[in-house]
Image (cartoon, rainbow, N blue to C red):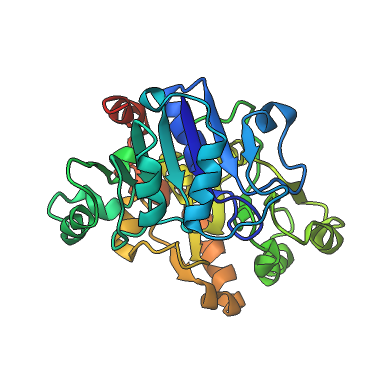
Amino acid sequence: MFYFRIDLGSQYGMGHYSRVLSLIDYLNIKEYKIVVDNLKNNNFSQKEKKNFICLYDKKKYKNEINDAKNFLSIIKEKKSTLTIVKDSYRFGFKWEKYIRKNCNKLVIIDDFPDKKHFADYYINHNPHFDNPKCDLINIIKKNNKKKCQFLLGTKYALFNLKSGKKSIRSDIVFYNGGSGNILVYEKIINGLVKIKKNFKIILIVGPYAKNHRKVFKRFNFIKNIKIISKPTNILNYLRGTKLFVSSAGVSAFESSALKLPTLLFQMNFNQNLQDFDYEKLGHYFMLKKNDLIQTGKIVNLVLLMMKEISMIKNIMVNNSIKKENVKKNFRKYF
């Protein structure tokens, strides 16, 4: 039995949830529970909700040791059959050491190599680790217990592989993560519409974005702009578009696997890959959040990327993600 402890909500977005869903898919896990603080809205279907457990519908979060105790109180399975997976920035070494006494395997999904852990399996899909002589590998090993198995680099990338529906055609898709404000692109979108009125543009408003109504009010009247509200899977839209403009989260791995030309913006502290690492994913167009004020330059960049789509795709052919091998790599260990 697998239990997943993750961060989910307006403060954390959908990234942690997306990664554990990928692991569930890779390993074909049938029996599992995803443990979160709470589910305050109706972003999920009844089929999805049956696999959630909420720790704090009635209680309040205090600290990581208290959380570990609450987490263990909901588990009925025997220690010998229990695998626990943590994908959270809040819970660290203390939580892990407490939990490890009560399970068979503890798996950690992480983005920060300098943090201390107590894991049996440590997963970090940063492309930086594709180099076996990477300077950070020794740091990670020092920060984990002995006999930990390290699953590092893009051959252990956690990203969605299946859409389940037909591709939805467009010229450009804009996305700012599960909880991000899509209106950060508003001036860019307006600039593009003025120049290219025939562009088919899709705006994906994440499940935990707080301004759905405002987005509809601003763009719903524009003929060639389609607003997609609260999807839990964006792959259908990525498969059908020519260019993707997005925050540099998990979706950067998805567009890499699809060989989809992409313009990325580093919006948050955890979107911390170096430029060379993004290049390993086939992404050569990477900007900072502060660059969004350069509206005219970004509009020109998007138009130039649209003009050179074929060339960009050819450059992306040799990126480091080989999605057909990812499942096999994980199944060697679980």
Dividing the picture into quadrants, the one containing residue 306 is: bottom right
- Please identify the residue farthest to the left as the structure is shown: 133
Identified at 74% across, 29% down, the residue is 46
User: On the image, which quarter does residue 297 sit in?
Assistant: bottom right
Whether residue 259 appears in this view of the structure is: no
Where is residue 82? Give x, y as percent: 41, 28
Residue drawn at (29%, 61%), measured in percent from left and top?
276
Nearer the observer, 171 or 239: 239
Q: Is residue 105 visible?
A: yes
Image quadrant containing the C terminus: top left
Of 47 and 86, the residue lying toward us: 86
* Residue located 34% across and 48% down the image: 97
Task: Indicate left or right for 113 with 195 as reference.
Answer: left
Q: Residue at x 83, y 57 (%)?
A: 216
Residue 62 in the image: above or below residue 256: below
Residue 108 image-quadrant placement: top left
Percent x, y of residue 76: 53, 27
Query: Relative to residue 291, is residue 265 depicted above or below?
Result: above
For the image, the number of numbered tags is 0
Along the viewing direction, whichever of 155 and 208 lies nearer the viewer: 208
**For residue 204, side relative to residue 241 (left or right):** right
- Left or right? Give the position of 280 relative to 170: left
Residue 13 locus on image (x, y percent)? 60, 54
Q: Position of residue 211 (x, y in %)?
A: 78, 61
